[in-house]
Amino acid sequence: MTSDVLPHGSWPSPVSARDLVAGGGVAAEPRADGDDVYWLGTTADSGSRVVLHRRDASGTVTEVSPDWMSVRSRVHEYGGGAYAVAGGVVVAVDFTTQRLWRLDGTPRPLTGATEGAAVRWGAPLVDLVRGVVLVVREDHRDIDAEPLNELVRLPLEPDADEPGFGEVVVAGRRRPLPRPDADDAGDPARPDFVSDPALSPDGRRLAWVQWSHPAMPWDAASVLVADLDAAGAPGPARVVAGGEGRTAVEPVWVDADRLAFLTEHDGFAVPHLVDATDPAATPRALAETGSEWGLPSWNLRTRALALLPDGRLVGVRHVGGTTRLTVVDPAAGAPTAVDLDLPLVAASGLATHAGGLVVDAGLPDVGWAAATVQVDGDAASLEVVAVRGTVPDAAYVARAEPVSWTGSGGAEAYGFLHRPTHPEVTGPEGELPPLVVVAHGGPTSATTTVPRAAYTFFTSRGIAVLDVDYAGSTGYGRAYRERLRGQWGVADVEDVVAGARHLAETGVVDGRRLGVRGGSAGGYVVLAALAFHDTFSAGVSLFGVSDPSLLAQETHKFESRYLDGLIGPWPAARETYEERSPLHHVDGITAPLLLLQGLEDKVVPPSQAQAMARGLREKQLPVALVEFAGEGHGFRDPESIVRAAELELSFLAQLWGYAPAEELPVLEVENLPRPDRD
């Protein structure tokens, strides 16, 4: 078969912008209740509305949530832990009102109503014996203080006329506004954040995670345990792991007395076990160090560790940028770790299921899917329950090739290269493809090798993609993550720039057509790369940070002290903030820039993109700002996703001089020199 020869970028692709909509980017958060499996997802009819589904033992799938509800929490703005199920009782958070509802039978609210969703709920845990639900409450009603995060309990059968706001189980700290700088603001005996309650099998003990400013949960979080009386009231709490300079997360009860969790040992998080009945007990590592277990706790109920029915534990383990599900045995006398032979490259949302577990799995031939895993000894098999998103025909999907290069400070940096891939088209002889470098968000996060339409969208058109795990990325241990400590906007940017140059210098891509794109913290990398380096000829920032000093003052509670570790405390480190601010260095930006921004973004407010566009216009530099009404931090409306993708293609085609195979909306780039005008 002969192939057509077409310029890179102009290849006809079966992946349209509409194909990027399927799945909506929502995590499946699978759960099991007996033989029933539950998960979250969007449908062709629901648009951005997230639906709770159930598959029963017969294989019949039904929608559990009513058609007026979108099941999403806004605790920490990022949500997670939007529902829980136990013994047939189903509770879920409605996105619009943020009220907690009981959905088995006729839907009924378990919490009171507030104006503007001022009280939010997340990570519910159903206690059937006491007839209550334990849940994280985030209270925004006091406008003179930071939102108050606490763990409360609510009756499963509330007063039908006046459901309340819960009885406090773990009290949180209330800090006054404006942004508190003193570490002792409020009551230091109480945490700023509390999450992920876990009830022992006999109901006698409660474990949870908590941490306080200025730490993020991956910096210094603690797992605590308290004994409960018959009514469910907690006794004195005791820390069993984590704390200053060390993190502990993901409490999982192995039995009534022993608690497992993820905490650090020699710079890597691994599963540990402790006797919760002994205040003097020392946690014992269940796996050897050398590889990182777990996931960064951006969301409630991340679930990277779960109990198998046979009493062993299974967790998410990272090796070389890919993920494995690995089993450890609490009964073994020495640390053990056995990888399950499963066809997955990423995983989250682990939970116990009959015969094994349920998992949100990233699969090479399917993409992301809610799945069940049957485990028999060291053997395992996986069954897909529901696919979220679509993966194009395998003939068009580029294989993720691991690459490394010398990055910031001479340290090794990592990424995955996706080459242009098309079964019927090749580029002209001697023409190298353009490259889009992707900077992931976070920055405390990582890329995955799960096939995704968003990358095939480029590669099937003849554009290469480099997905970078820059300094600060997770999955490589604390030392790699802390390469970004005090170096945000420097080490990550230098890694991204060096990765692009490496591929250009080794003849893989066209060094004259290098682009960089990213969202949120990845958007900051885009803007800083353009402001402080001259490597890229195009940049696309999705809701990116243009001025970190504004972010330090304007962002939400969860991340309000995040930059203390990434750059320095504000305002003491004002000079460093200004040095790292792309907005303060717009003169350095010569490459055209596309800014895509949601107008309801509470994490990176629209003022960030607006200020950057204004600064570039004043300097007569090429820029396009496209704002999306009703969108927050990350686009969810299908029409917004389609429009953003088509505009990005239009933008790159204009800059790199090729004719797209499809008809695209014309993006007007202000101040862009055009041959027909000059």
Image (cartoon, rainbow, N blue to C red):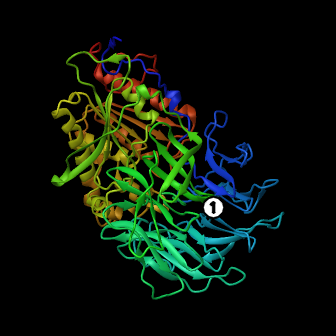
Quarter the N terminus occupies: top left
Give the image location of residue 165, x and y in percent: 70, 68
Provide residue 256's location: percent of width, then percent of height: 60, 78
For residue 34, above or below residue 510: below
Q: Secondary structure at mark 1?
A: strand
**Image quadrant of residue 80?**
bottom right
Can residue 444 be seen here?
no
- Number of numbered discs on residues: 1
Image side of residue 207 versus residue 495, left or right = right
Quadrant for residue 638, please give it.
Answer: top right
Residue denoted by label 1: 121
Q: Residue at x 55, y 63 (%)?
A: 308
At x 49%, y 87%, the residue is 279
- Residue drawn at (56%, 35%), measured in percent from left and top? 22
Name the residue rendered at 27%, 63% in the picture. Answer: 479
471 w.r.t. 642: above or below: below
The crowding category of the residue bearing disc 1, from other C-alpha atoms within 10 Å (few below 14, some 14 to 19, many at least 20), is many
Q: Observer-nearest residue: 325 or 483? A: 325
Q: Amino acid at mark 1?
A: Trp
* Left or right of residue 580, residue 23 in this image: right
Task: From the top left corner, tell me how far across and down residue 135 is, in percent.
Answer: 63, 67
The quadrant of the picture occupied by the C terminus is: top left
Q: Quadrant of residue 229?
A: bottom right
Say whether residue 227 is left or right of residue 76: right
Is 72 or 57 nearer to us in this picture?
A: 57
